[in-house]
Image (cartoon, coloured by chain):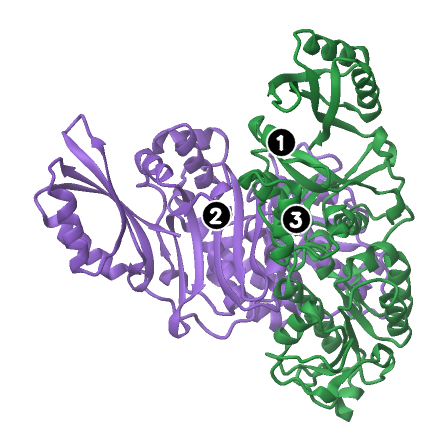
Chain colours: A green, B purple
Amino acid sequence: MLDTPNSSTLAHTATSDSPDFSVPIVLGMIGLGTVGTGVYKILSRRTDLVFHQIAVRSLKKERDLPGLDSERLTDNAKSIVSDPAIQVVIEVMGGVDEARPLVIEAFKNGKHVITANKELIAKHGAELFDLAKARNVRLMFEGAVAAGIPIIMPLKLSLAANNILEIAGILNGTTNYMLTQMAEENWNYEEALLQAQKKGFAEADPTSDVGGHDAAYKISILASIAFKKRIDMKHVYCKGITSVTATDIQLAESLGYTIKLIGLCRQAEAGQLDIRVHPVLVEHDHPLASIKNENNAIWIKGDAVGDVMFYGKGAGEMPTASAVCADLLAVTTDLHKGNDPIPSMEIETTGFANILPVTETKNKYFVRLHTADHPGVIGLIGTACGEFGVSLESIVQHGIHEEDGTASIVFITHELAEKQMLKALDKIKADPAIQKLGCVLRIL
Amino acid sequence: MLDTPNSSTLAHTATSDSPDFSVPIVLGMIGLGTVGTGVYKILSRRTDLVFHQIAVRSLKKERDLPGLDSERLTDNAKSIVSDPAIQVVIEVMGGVDEARPLVIEAFKNGKHVITANKELIAKHGAELFDLAKARNVRLMFEGAVAAGIPIIMPLKLSLAANNILEIAGILNGTTNYMLTQMAEENWNYEEALLQAQKKGFAEADPTSDVGGHDAAYKISILASIAFKKRIDMKHVYCKGITSVTATDIQLAESLGYTIKLIGLCRQAEAGQLDIRVHPVLVEHDHPLASIKNENNAIWIKGDAVGDVMFYGKGAGEMPTASAVCADLLAVTTDLHKGNDPIPSMEIETTGFANILPVTETKNKYFVRLHTADHPGVIGLIGTACGEFGVSLESIVQHGIHEEDGTASIVFITHELAEKQMLKALDKIKADPAIQKLGCVLRIL
């Protein structure tokens, strides 16, 4: 697989008149970590694609990759994006500060870029797509959302005849594994995180996963495709799972709900976009409720297709490499054919989305309170809710906490504006009979 | 939307040097039934695509479609495929005998064809794809499998870097609705069929659905893409749900399984393809077990991506129109850009698949027997099974049938060759203590 490109390879360009599939496409790759290794393994089956150079952090690291010629490795990533032999650059180094200027330089040198870098696309997609378009090269990123689960291309092409009404996704495998285990094994948050780290799902610093940022990058990318608007990440409400307790999960289950970390995006009124990441209660019979452990799923509602869902592993060496290589094959097929860049893979936006503040959103709520165990408390909650137009669907007292003699009261509301809910909660919290606000979660 | 194409439209061909998206693409449609009406509704939003002619069965039928100019309707379908103004033909009439010569004629006249006709593609795909390739026109068929659920394009493009190992699909909404209702409402087959007909899911003649033929067309199409082989429908084993009883469903549920009609295709040993349609028991925690009512789902195992699943409505006016229009937009984008036909949408096969006879397949089995209620029966079954190498996973006696005093015995086997299972069943049936063989089902 690692051949020196010959002159006929170099002469083969996108404007060739007679496509010749026997002439290999010359690749450079930046990064040979988890995903890069997977890409290398898949491509080692093929003879129509050759790696000219692969940039690595350390040339000294032992790598057990069959056929890997150490002369093809470099620790100078810049040489990949400037090498005239290379037609397509695969960026799988991750991060933004180093990756962004390399991708920009690759575009300036007329190279197509394939990336699985969600943070790069979410934060700098607009700039990068504009630049790729200006240079008539491709920027492909199927691996940036939900790894190998086909989602970018289906959303952009297969659902193109739809107005997308809503997307709700389980977009982070680490947190879904943790929430599943907290529900099934009754583990607390710390135990679940430790197990996720032991299994290799969670990083030593799990902030991006458990804080919801990883999911926020992904839902922002999907939203920009579905709603054709640039998303300013600063305005995407993002709350992770760090305050979700096993108690809340068990109570939610007993009421017919599963707690999931969801990336959500839907058309709100007056052209605003409701986009956010936070834990939600999902009804047991919703397709997303059955997505367990480290799996991902994206549920999409279109005005023609109705509800569709895409499910699979959302991370890992081979699943992510599957997506990167699919992008690569799409690009190389077009290069061989002399086709124009696949227009559908560009994110074409019409300016920034007007994002609805989360306080303006409407939701159903699940609220857990610790109260003194006396008969008036349910009346007190009902009265406070009524005062602020909060209509209750159910209210249940869930036994006495032995440690402090308080009772848990759980109530579920009908749909209402978040700011009303906050006012009612302020009133409830202020009452001396309420010891503590345990948990407030939105319901999908 | 229904405009007379002007000369600039006619002059716009795939080889145009300067793509002009303001020049509309001229369409003809054959059929204005359920799917055709959906396509008309979606396209009535657009100005870049104009219907030149639509062929209908009867010009006298009242049609409540806004903007539909009756002068655009014809009852002569041949005029659509021969009209020089028409660039793309949408075939949504269904059936094979009339549709096939029309599609062939369209290709001969240099027109691209979009169809949702699963029977046409399954039976005559090889001939049609060869012809389309020879004429350098496109044949698109996303709507032929699972309606609007993106599956043809994702399988062909997004999973292109994978060796596909297995596909298992709930590909027929009618039978999945019936099986769901038989499980949840304890209806018998006849009640379930009647309700499916009342809801409009089942035709007056339900043979293609309940006999499994509809699912067989669809799994054959998916198999031809995934395994790059032509599938001779004559060799695809196909058994429907007509003999599945509510009793079997309830017994299977009690053992942790749901009964589903599945289209299955996987690589067998020695290059053979194991492809078939029949009811199977699916373990409750398999993603396919949770697919209820008229929904479809396709579960795919790839060597890189692992397991992925695609879920949604598999039939209906707007879901199917969503797929047809997605194909149309892909074709028209390429026409505007002057790109070569999307190569990936052709089914490129390397000859006919060598299909494994169902008697040579290996499965786990669920068997229900009626026996005289005496203590030796379980021993008898165990001995007969042992003689033919049938290893039992479990065997349970399920009470006495009041009407005839027989007992139901259910056993589940480990995986074994079907021919061994048949021999053991012959031996068991021959014993006078066995009154009747109730049901034999394979387990996924």
Helix, strand, or loop for circle 1? Answer: helix
Residue closest to the eye, B11 or A371: A371
Residue closest to the eye, A102 or A374: A374
Which residue is the site of mark 2? B286
Helix, strand, or loop for circle 2? Answer: loop
Residue closest to the eye, A400 or A260: A400
Residue placed at 59% from the left, 79% from the top?
Answer: A45
Q: In which quarter of the image is the N terminus of chain B?
A: top right
On screen, residue A5 versus residue B303, left or right, reads: right
**Cα distance between the residues tagged 2 and 1:** 28 Å
Residue closest to the eye, B387 or A371: A371
The chain letter under disc 1 is A
Q: In which quarter of the image is residue B321?
A: top right
What mark, if any, has residue A193 been given in the picture? Answer: 3
Pointer 2 local density, CA inside 10 Å: few below 14, some 14–19, many at least 20:
few
Name, please, the residue furthest toward the left. B432
Which residue is the site of mark 1? A247
Pointer 1 local density, CA inside 10 Å: few below 14, some 14–19, many at least 20:
some
Q: Quadrant of residue A372?
A: top right
- Name the amino acid type tagged 2: His
Closer mark to the observer between disc 3 and disc 2? 3
Upstream in sequence: badge 3 or badge 1: 3
Residue placed at 77% from the left, 50% from the top?
Answer: A207
On screen, residue B324 versus residue A105, left or right, reads: left
Q: Where is residue B279 in the image (x, y as percent from the top left)?
A: 37, 47
The chain letter under disc 2 is B
Q: Does residue B40 lie above or below B142 as drawn?
A: above
On screen, residue A154 versus residue B193, left or right, reads: right
- Whether residue B100 is visible here, answered yes or no, is no
